[in-house]
Amino acid sequence: MSTAYPLPTNLSTTTVTNTASLLRIVALGLISAAAIASRLFAVINFESIIHEFDPWFNYRATRVLASQGFYEFWNWFDPTAWYPLGRVVGGTVYPGLMATSGVIYNFLHAFHLPVDIRNICVLLAPGFSALTAWATYMFTKEMKDESAGLLAAAFIGIVPGYISRSVAGSYDNEAIAIFLLMFTFYCWIKALKTGSALFGTLAAVFYFYMVAAWGGYAFITNMIPVHALTLMLMGRFSSRLYVAYCSWYAIGTLSSMQVPFVGFQPVRTSEHMGALGVFGLLQIVAFAQLARSHLSSKQFQNLLTVSVVAMGVVGTFGFIALTYMGWIAPWTGRFYSLWDTGYAKKYIPIIASVSEHQPTAWPSFFMDLQLLIFLFPAGVILCFRELRDEHVFVIIYSVVASYFAGVMVRLMLTLTPVVCVSSAVAFSSLIDTYLDPTQPEGEEESEADSSNGTNTAATPSKKEKAKKPAASTSALNDIVTAATSQSSSKSKSKGIWGLDTRLIVIVNAIGMLSFFVFHCTWVTANAYSSPSVVLASTNPDGSQHIIDDFREAYYWLRQNTPQDAVVMSWWDYGYQIAGMADRPTLVDNNTWNNSKSHIATVGKAMSSSEEVAYPILRKHDVDYVLVIFGGLLGYSGDDINKFLWMVRIAQGVWPDEIQEPNYFTPQGEYRVDDRASSAMKNSLMYKMSYYRFAELFGGNNAMDRVRQQTMPKVGPTLDYLDEAFTSENWIVRIYQVRKEDLLGRDLKSANAFAQGKKKKKSKPVSRRKAIPV
Amino acid sequence: MKWSAFLPLFLLPAAFAATKDKDAVREQLIDLAAKGNGLIKLDSKTFDLLTLPSRDWSASIQFTALDRRRRCAPCKEFDPSWNAVAKAWSTAPKEHRDTHFFGTLDFDEGQTVFQKLGLASAPLVYVYPAAEGPRQLPNGKTAPSKYDFSNGFEAEPLANHLSSHTPIPIPYRAPIDWARWATFISGILSLVLTLRFISPILQSRWTWAAITVLTSLTMTGGFMFTRIRGTPYTGPDGSWIAGGYQNQYGQEVQVVALIYGTLSFAFLMLTVIVPYQSSASRQRMQVYLWSAVIMLIYSVLVTIFRLKNRGYPFKLLL
Amino acid sequence: MSSSNSSPSAQSTSPQSPILSLWKAYTQNTSDRLKFIDTFLVFLMASGVIQFLYCVLVTNFPFNAFLAGFASTVGQFVLTASLRSQVNPENRSEFKEVSPERAFADFAIGSIVLHFFVFNFLG
């Protein structure tokens, strides 16, 4: 056998395997380091701070857990959220994330390492990303081999699709959930391959952890049954499948019911019924198999088949009947909106309003996955070539996840692992082929037609490393072996001639990989490392300018208002106000409970005129109203841009009073300048955003830099609210609601009274504070 | 015109009915509604009757322009839904039915009304609440409220919305879509019948591989985005690529999926097919060919991406 | 498992001979160890059926207690059934990596974890 390049011949097999495993450990260590390091951009560029919105609540809850212990946390009733309702936190959270940080915190303090809980929270996501890389390595190893595993680990370590949810400071459920997802899947595959109840139990335990950590656990709850069902339909039922599935389901379901927020859902809702159905089906099929093994009468076997099918049908109808009787809850809106994509906009606008629930355009896919996105189908095809049980899993996963990722940007996160696994399989197959030093036998060999070529790989099992030809030569490293093992059993010659061909493919591959690394670094540094609590802009000389309006305003609230002052804002900012300003809020980001009307109330107050809004504000004891305004700075995520959602949500509850078309110009444009509709101009949100905005520009025309529209010279006036605070760049504006008794007369009468009052009152307002520019 | 012959007959009673006897007006309206299958065909006179300031009934009125010259496609689309809901209301019990009326005012029948109300577009639905009597709104509002078409022109959401203004919910039931069921059932039947013949295809893994790969390619090409947002196939000026990072046209799905597919295919060729070639020169040629294809197409892809994301700093060959 | 119970009863309309011959084949070909496991399985099934009937006919009031009890029997049933298929000599080829001893260890660990959750859930 000729080789394309010389190989050392004096190496023993043990040396090679030992070196290979050492290299693997070193590589995994480096991958973990890279995964952690690339997530630290946010800390280096800004500071060690909690990001965005939801993490602020998680952080606040974790602080309670760390300072007061687990039982206090479990029974914590938070009176400041959803004023005046309050929130039973213990029963309405997935506690896995907080419990994890709490355990780490107590563990470190037991060793007298006085680490601040904030730093644990900030660095939790990067730490778990290293574990995710390891779990992905283990998972991919089961699909192909160690070299593919290492590639997959490297991919998931730095791929932006996962970094987007796990940078330092992004202290959210997804931070630990992806690790749990991958590890549960790994345990499931391992259990299926070996038929060991131990791995089934492990899968169930990690499933429990996942249920405790993230609402996305339903993905596992349905993925594994679909896999099992597909295997049965393919005629691949085996006792291993029975052992793996039953041990996972029996323990996993029971354990998932321990989480209070999940409760009895696993036996009462449709999302979980698929798993139960497959469980029942497996029992029937297993019993039929057992009976069949004892008896081979043809007639009896037919009867058995018929009865299995009949019972399956009866079971299905049973589920449908139970659903109609109301014992099993139908699909919840969130899941239903994944199938009927118009559903959410019609019936649950709160869910549709969240930016991460929007559908994904292709640039997002490319941005988040880059070259993996086109390697991914190649990997799927390679899985089809072998099509062992575990490959079926990857195939199903890839179809389901790519659909979900297309429907919702947020679910890109579930697509990312399978893309990494699949493209690692494709990429390592390519490298295997072109690193393999063996050259084909000779040119006179009968030509291999392609159709034959694609099918040959299905038969030989790759596990036996012993099968590889000429152990001494090809023992260069483990990476090479996988591809060569195939050719040995076949007479067909397979391989690459010459060195230049190898070189060009390998150089090309390395070039693409390094481009991928540059891409990931750029995306991470530029797109995904902003805390969104602190903004950054670039000065003309290239230096960084920090815009810290949010914290400025929240600390103003904390310092200058009474402890029990109720703050109303759009729900996006609820958690931040609670976390940073420590004040009660009307609504916050916890939108899954049924306080829809509460959010709609805020939406109505914001979108109606002052006269209509004022009684609402008074009725809810609102002392301060907070709006986000980006018109001065060009910050596009402000409330005027979110305003239409407030209108829509309010319209869902009061369709007669609030109507979306009224907020557009007759031409159907969304405008804020002279031509804005009267409903728009009179709305509380508009007035609060642009109050005294024109004065800022002296005599010149005021310009809204987000909407690129010229504002009218005379801005709106406010009768029922006082401007209390405006931050440096005008991003946060806080207004105080006037009290009735302050006026000394009956305010309830009418507008005329308000007009008269305004003349008296307007002087102190304008004199009271100088607007910072 | 049919109406002009008919009008003088009841114009006289209508004139003093408006001032004196609203019960008589109601009787008239009931008659008209019964004649029109639950729907009153309005003109400017009957419109005034229906929206009498002293009415103790409520009314929902559709303003439309069905005449072909008006070129109002949405009007034609909405009209059947409106008629269906009005018809459903006519099956309600009499004591409730006669307290709420459905009317349709065509632009060509009542231009003055359109001018008076300042209506510039059609179709529109206004609901006039009762101004007097037991069905007057608690807040005393008598001004009409507008129905918002954000839920589309279907009858179902319309009936749901109007039900909040009628004394009892409108007994509207969506007609069974027989055609759809028939297609569904015949589809299943034909599938079962052909199952014998196509089962080799269904059992082939490569059929499923093709389905899987095509699905994931269309999905990652942003197909669901175009579906959900209803973006057009190409831009209004014929451009096939939409500006902006969070936007795309239908054609981009095809182009991007094709690019991904080509790249994927080139990788597969290099991995799976090329090593089985029997002659060294042919193999070498193929290696160079597919490597060049990967480089070129990848560069094209990056270039297209730079069009979408202006700030992207990297580029390949192009 | 109630479903696997009903499978033979669905056959009762057919001639009795298949059931009888099945029974005969079972008693002849099964080792005593497996029969012992099967006895336990039958016991668990009976226990599960009784609990289910109690829940349907009498009350499901402490629903978590019912679920805990029922899940413990079902879970124990499937774990035992897994053990049975793992130690069954006929399935030797399928479980290359699971020796009978390993199978029993797996079974024990699975049962411990299961009953830990059952105990926690009893409330």
Image (tube, coloured by chain):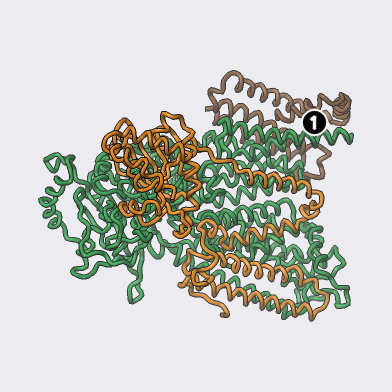
Amino acid bearing label 1: Leu
Q: What element carries label 1?
A: helix
The answer to which quarter of the image holds residue A457 is bottom right
Q: Is residue A730 left or right of residue A227?
A: left
Q: Say which chain is green.
A: A
Residue at image location 29% in from the left, 39% down from the top:
B18
Q: Which chain carries label 1?
A: C
Residue at image location 54% in from the left, 45% down from the top:
A336
Q: In the image, is residue B62 above or below residue A287?
A: below
Q: Say which chain is orange.
A: B
Camera-nearest residue between A81 and C8: C8
Q: In this view, does A131 lie to the left or right of C15?
A: left
Q: In this view, does A382 lie to the left or right of A273?
A: right
In the rendering, at what x and y percent does residue C107 appear?
69, 36
Q: In the image, is residue A308 above or below residue A437?
A: above
Camera-nearest residue between A143 and C54: C54
Q: Name the residue under label 1.
A: C34
In the rendering, at what x and y percent does residue A686 appear?
28, 55
Quadrant where the N terminus of chain A lies? Answer: bottom right
The answer to which quarter of the image holds residue C119 is top right
Label 1 packing within 10 angstroms: few (<14), some (14-19), many (20+): some
Q: Is residue A248 left or right of residue B73?
A: right
Residue at image location 64% in from the left, 50% down from the top:
A186
Quadrant where the C terminus of chain A lies? Answer: bottom left
Residue A634 seen anywhere in this rendered image of the structure: yes
In the rendering, at what x and y percent does residue A341 appear?
53, 51
Q: Most extreme residue toward the top, as rendered?
A: C58
Camera-nearest residue between A474 and A299: A299
Q: Say which chain is brown.
A: C
Camera-nearest residue between B74 and B149: B74
In the rendering, at what x and y percent does residue A267 appear?
58, 34
Residue A124 seen anywhere in this rendered image of the structure: no
